[in-house]
Amino acid sequence: MSGDTIPGYAYGDESLPTPPIEMAEFEQLKQSVMFTDEDEEYLQMAGDVLEPQIDDILDVWYGFVSDHDFLLYYFTSADTGEPIEEYLDRVRERFEQWIRDTCDAPYDEEWLAYQFEIGRRHHRSGKNEADDVAAVPNIDLRYVIAFIYPITATIRDFLRNGDHSQEDVDNMYHAWFKSVVLQVSLWSYPYVTDDDW
Amino acid sequence: MSGDTIPGYAYGDESLPTPPIEMAEFEQLKQSVMFTDEDEEYLQMAGDVLEPQIDDILDVWYGFVSDHDFLLYYFTSADTGEPIEEYLDRVRERFEQWIRDTCDAPYDEEWLAYQFEIGRRHHRSGKNEADDVAAVPNIDLRYVIAFIYPITATIRDFLRNGDHSQEDVDNMYHAWFKSVVLQVSLWSYPYVTDDDW
C-alpha cells in the first residue's frame, strides 16, 4: 500500500512543523547510537527482507500488545475503557508503513520532521488527533522507551527469513536496533521541556 | 571493590526516597521489555564473564564519550567548559559498580529505589550533587535514551570472551539489552511530569 492512501499518514506533509533541532544536531544524535552510512544500506537490505512479512510482523506486535492489558490500555476509550477497533486498525496501517520508512533511508529533514510528529502523537499534545478518537490521552513515556526492546528483538526472526548470511542478518538487526533507539530518542521530545531534552 | 567504599554510591541507602511506582507496576514494565526470571539467571552468568573485564569495558565506554565532544560535554565545568577529571573518575567507579549491580539480580525494591536516584543524577534535579561538582546542570534526555545502543552493543564482544556457547552469549546479551532499556525507562522519570511518565 502506498503511503498516500493511509489515513492520518503525514510523512512529507508540508504542514508539519520544522524540526526543533538542526541537522547538525541530528547528526550528533546519530553518532551517539553509532549510526553510519553502512547502517542505511543494511536497513535497505532489511526492507527487502521484511516487506513480504509486514503483516506477520504486525500480528506479532499487536499480539504482544493485546496480551498485556496495561499496553492495550493505550488503545482504549477514555470513557468506556474498551479497545477502539477502528483506532487499532488505523494505527496498524501506519505502523506497517513505519517499517518501510524505517528501512528506506536516508534520514533527511523530511524524515526527521515526521519523527517529531510521531512523538507528538504518542504524547497528550497530539494523541488521538490524527484518528479523531476519544482514546486515553497519553502514552506514558516509560512504555514508549520500554517498547524499544520488543520492537527490536522480535524483528530478528523475520530478518533471518531472507537469503542472507548470518553476518548480514546481524548487521541488519543492529542497524534496526540503532534506528529504533534513535527514533524513540526523538519521540521523547514533547514529553520534556526544551532545556531538559 | 566493594560498593561501600565507592564515593557517592547509594545503593541500599535508607535515605533514598521510596520508588514512585509500586512493585506491581514495575512488574508491568519488566513485562514490556520481556524480562523474565531466566533473564536474571543469564545476567548472573554475564556478571561472572564481565567481572574480570570491567576495567576494559569502562575504557571502551569512556573512549566513546571522549571521542565525542558533545558527549564529553556532560562532564565539563559549567564555568570553564573543561572536562572535570575528578568527576570523570568518580563517575567511572560507580559505572563499574553499575555493571555488577545490573548483573546481580534480583531487581527488588532496593534496586528500584536506586534506579530512580540514578535517574535524578542525570537530570538537573540531582546532577552533580553526589560529587559536589559545578559541571553542566543536566544530561539531555535524548542522549540518555540514545546511550541504550552503545552501552548494549559494545558489551557483546566482552560476553563472547567467556567460555559459553553462542546461544548462552546471545541469551546473556539479550538479558543485558532488556535490563538497559528497563533502566533507562526508569531513569527518564525526573524529566517528565508524573502524568506523562
Image (cartoon, coloured by chain):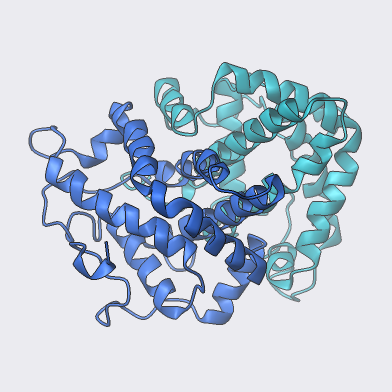
Chain colours: A blue, B cyan
Residue depicted at 43% across the width and 72% down the height: A112
Note whether A62 is above or below B39 in the view shown. Answer: below
Q: Position of residue B49 (x, y in %)?
A: 84, 28
| B138, B158: nearer the viewer | B158
Note whether B149 is above or below B46 in the view shown. Answer: below
Q: Position of residue A93 (x, y in %)?
A: 26, 53
Q: Position of residue A41 (x, y in %)?
A: 60, 67
| B126, A146: nearer the viewer | A146
Note whether A20 is above or below B9 in the view shown. Answer: below
Q: Left or right? Give the position of B175 relative to B189.
A: right
Q: Count numbered badges in the picture.
A: 0
Q: Left or right? Give the position of B170 relative to B62.
A: left
Which residue lies most toward the left here? A79
Q: Is residue B123 visible?
A: no
Residue depicted at 63% across the width and 52% down the height: A174
Q: Left or right? Give the position of A144 relative to B169.
A: left
Residue depicted at 74% across the width and 72% down the height: B69
| B80, B183: nearer the viewer | B183
Q: Position of residue B99 (x, y in %)?
A: 75, 35
Q: Where the N terminus of chain A falls, by quadrant?
A: bottom left
Occupied quadrant, residue B176: top right
Occupied quadrant, residue A76: top left
Q: Left or right? Give the position of B43 relative to A124.
A: right
Which residue lies most toward the front here? A163
Occupied quadrant, residue A38: bottom right
Residue depicted at 31% across the width and 46% down the height: A139
| A146, B195: nearer the viewer | A146
Q: Is residue A171 visible?
A: yes
